[in-house]
Image (cartoon, grey):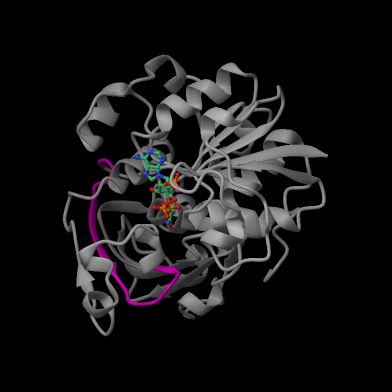
Amino acid sequence: MVRVGIVGATGYTGLELIRLLSSHPDVELAWLTSETHAGQRLAEVYPTTVETRLLSWQEVSLHREDVVFLCLPHGASMAAVRRAYDAGCYVIDLSADFRLPTPALYERWYGHPHQEPELLTKAVYGLPEVYRERVRGARLIANPGCYPTSVNLALYPLARTGLLSAPIIVDSKSGVSGAGRKPKLNTHFVEANENLSPYAIGRQHRHIAEMERVLGEAWQGPGTPDILFAPHLLPVSRGILSTIYVTLAQDTRPEQVWEVYQVHYAHEPFVHVLPLGQVATLRHSQYSNRCVIGLTPVDARRWIITSSIDNLIKGASGQAVQNMNIALGLVETAGLETGL
Ligand SMILES: NC(=O)c1ccc[n+]([C@@H]2O[C@H](COP(=O)([O-])OP(=O)(O)OC[C@H]3O[C@@H](n4cnc5c(N)ncnc54)[C@H](OP(=O)(O)O)[C@@H]3O)[C@@H](O)[C@H]2O)c1
């Protein structure tokens, strides 16, 4: 059995990992950490039947070959990643701390210097459908952001054909769990309920860097993958729906574009391309590790692409389990079959 520990287990992504890993056939959940609730049982902190006692991170004895999932805010994750990596563990970081390739890019988007630039060079960006070969055997995996997962999977097949042109307009809506469990004014029930709020629109949101990184590596079209991004807070608990407006570089038959996606994702267990013209909705992916993509032609050049994921599963903890499975050579879908 693989020994697994979760740092920051009382947050939404940590709790989702506990749920998924509890039914993983190859995993033993060895320890869970919380700084605020160290010493208490998980069941005292969250309505669950899991009675495991929470440890503080410093109390944990790390074993070589353990898998350590880090579910901490960005900035707080770097030192913990260093400790787990130096102990010889496999490290899967769900924060943004190791997702960008250089310290300069990290500082530009996150506003503070990277504390572990040497470790950054060892990190693999864990989007399995694009970088599966890099993830195999990797000891430090940067789990992608939720919005970038929905957008990159929706655009990657087109980006590599040379058919896609910029700018690309991305309108995304996220459920409130995307903002984490810690209460904030804008996620307060009365503020969020029966409301729909855009935030950080244009070129402000940090996730643009991950979108342009992945699409830029595949990009064959004219110019660069310049993204205009409008994220919204949607008053549902979970789910992301991205509606993406694209213009192709040349006139193309609808069946040709649809076939590009069909062929590209034919063997992917967690990406589903809907029949031409059918739109993806939140319901298509909620509680699953699936990304569901809808392709709607508007005319010979313009398309609207819809992409749906569960932000806590394919957008975070499910993708992290998928990455662990690949890195360790386990069955890629193990522990993730629910809702397939
Ligand atoms: N929510 C999503 O949909 C989603 C999707 C993709 C990626 N992510 C990323 O995954 C990470 C975790 O997200 P989340 O939604 O699970 O967050 P969360 O619900 O706010 O939980 C984070 C946990 O980290 C611990 N923590 C908070 N501040 C800390 C600090 N300054 N230093 C050390 N520990 C601290 C807290 O646990 P204790 O106080 O009990 O220790 C808290 O329970 C974040 O980096 C987030 O950006 C989230």
Residue 314 position within the rendered picture, expressed as x and y whole percent measured from the top left: 54, 57
Residue 41 position within the rendered picture, expressed as x and y whole percent measured from the top left: 61, 54
Drawn side of residue 63 relative to residue 154, left or right: right
Residue 103's place in the image compared with 194, above or below, is above
Quadrant in which the C terminus is drawn: bottom right
Quadrant in which the N terminus is drawn: top right
Residue 36's place in the image compared with 285, above or below, is above
| Residue that sits furthest to the front in the current view | 39
| Residue that sits furthest to the bottom in the current view | 194
Name the residue rendered at 23%, 50% in the picture: 205
Q: Is residue 98 visible?
A: no
Name the residue rendered at 31%, 55% in the picture: 249
Residue 20 position within the rendered picture, expressed as x and y whole percent measured from the top left: 66, 58
Q: Is residue 42 visible?
A: yes
Residue 193's place in the image compared with 32, above or below, is below
- In depth, the one of 65 and 225 nearer the eye is 65
Which quadrant holds residue 115? top left
- Give the number of marks: 0
- In depth, the one of 290 and 42 nearer the eye is 42
In reply to whether residue 238 is colored magenta, the answer given is: yes
In reply to whether residue 93 is colored magenta, the answer given is: no
Drawn side of residue 294 relative to residue 22, left or right: left
Drawn side of residue 307 relative to residue 233, left or right: right
- In depth, the one of 218 and 270 nearer the eye is 270
Name the residue rendered at 45%, 70% in the picture: 238
Name the residue rendered at 49%, 80% in the picture: 278
Residue 175 position within the rendered picture, expressed as x and y whole percent measured from the top left: 38, 69
Residues drawn in magenta: 223-241
